[in-house]
Amino acid sequence: MASIVEVLAVIGVLLLIPNVYRFVSFIWLYFLRPSSIRSYLHGPAPYAIVTGATDGIGKAVAAELYDKAFNLILHGRNDEKMRKVINELRARGTHDTDIRYFLVDAAQPGHDFAQMMEPYKDLNITLVIHNVGGSYGLQPERIDERSEEHILSVVHWNAIFPLFLTRALLPRLRVSAKHGPVLVQFIGSIAGDISPPRLPIYAASKKFLEGLTRGLDNDERYFGTPTGVRFTYIAVGAVVSNSLRADVNLGRPTSETFAKTLVARSGCGKRRVAPYVVHAIMQWAMEAMGEEVVDRYSAEEMANLIAAEEKKA
Ligand SMILES: NC(=O)c1ccc[n+]([C@@H]2O[C@H](COP(=O)([O-])OP(=O)(O)OC[C@H]3O[C@@H](n4cnc5c(N)ncnc54)[C@H](OP(=O)(O)O)[C@@H]3O)[C@@H](O)[C@H]2O)c1
Ligand SMILES: *[C@@H]1O[C@H](CO)[C@@H](O)[C@H](O)[C@H]1NC(C)=O
């Protein structure tokens, strides 16, 4: 007969297995796994699309991909700023690949997405980075103190624009996927996990992207013949950018540092990934603390941040 101690020991080991697995996967993903970004460089002229590419994370990702020899289709909203960014990319002198761009206000409704993508319909696009998005800073108003127009613009900016852009691109992405891997990445936010006060629409729009990622990935993989188009949701914590002008610290890297990690994890096979290791640890810590503690803490943080914004204004 097994003693109680032996039974407990067996239960202990069984409980330990998932954690050991998680730890080993963590070490593999962040410290050992070689980047597979080059697997998306197939065909004679592979293109990557980056939205919101004139500043912050998007601009830094575009530069990383340019250095890796991708041809680029960049999205922004300001012609002058876009031309400046393209000149800066060219000045890196790493490659002489093609750079094209289009300008659209992502927060506005009513775009003709098919027409928007018409100039690129014959290109082999192998990578899509849906980066555009944001929250109009930190503001004290609740949703009933906001216009419908304001709320809809947050949803368009973060959720509807990437959804319909993906829809317009999919037929073409499936063609590229016949020759090699194709990846669509949606830039999400930790806000989507914790839904802090005063940011419910932004948080819900990012959560929408996470649901969309899994649904579209399942659609392309398991229903009918697999097409080879894959999807990833990128969990982003604080990153210094044009919309977050703050000091760099361990938990808040520069956009350039973050972009390097994003490119390094691209194609790692996870449907959701926090590319920057400290963000991943913070995410794990928040799960461990539980919703109640996180909610109280994030409410306090939001109150402090909003007070600081108001003091500046
Ligand atoms: N930074 C963070 O701490 C953080 C944290 C979590 C998630 N994120 C997510 O990361 C993504 C990038 O954020 P970021 O911090 O890098 O922002 P950023 O520095 O402000 O850059 C945003 C980029 O998007 C463009 N853009 C903004 N609004 C647009 C609109 N309505 N239509 C077209 N283009 C527009 C900007 O164009 P202009 O150059 O003309 O302004 C710029 O190219 C967003 O999806 C954001 O939600 C960021
Ligand atoms: C797209 O890639 C395929 C396979 O590598 C190639 O045959 C085709 O010419 C490419 N199309 C363009 C426009 O580069």
Image (cartoon, rainbow, N blue to C red):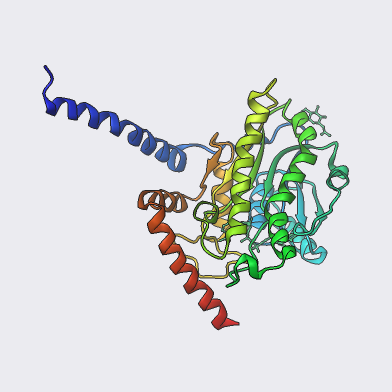
Along the horizontal axis of the image, is 309 left or right of 88?
Answer: left
At x 58%, y 62%, the residue is 199
Q: Which is nearer the eye, 236 or 94?
A: 236
Along the horizontal axis of the image, is 175 left or right of 24?
Answer: right
Numbered marks: total? 0
Along the horizontal axis of the image, is 135 left or right of 15?
Answer: right
Residue 201: horizontal and vertical position, in percent? Answer: 62, 58
Residue 207: horizontal and vertical position, in percent? Answer: 59, 48
Which quadrant holds the N terminus?
Answer: top left
Residue 120: horizontal and vertical position, in percent? Answer: 84, 42
Residue 69: horizontal and vertical position, in percent? Answer: 69, 43
At x 64%, y 26%, the residue is 221
Judge whether 119 appears above or below 107 on screen: above
Q: Which is nearer the eye, 244 or 260?
A: 244
Judge whether 262 appears above or below 242 on screen: above
Judge whether 245 appears above or below 213 on screen: below
Along the horizontal axis of the image, is 129 left or right of 122?
Answer: left
Quick check: which quadrant has ligand 2?
Answer: top right
| Residue farthest along the front direction in this orientation | 144
Which quadrant holds the C terminus?
Answer: bottom right
Residue 44 location, quadrant: top right
Residue 52 seen from this side: no
Q: Which is nearer the eye, 246 or 189?
A: 189
Residue 311 seen from this side: yes
Residue 106 location, quadrant: bottom right
Judge whether 44 appears above or below 57 on screen: above
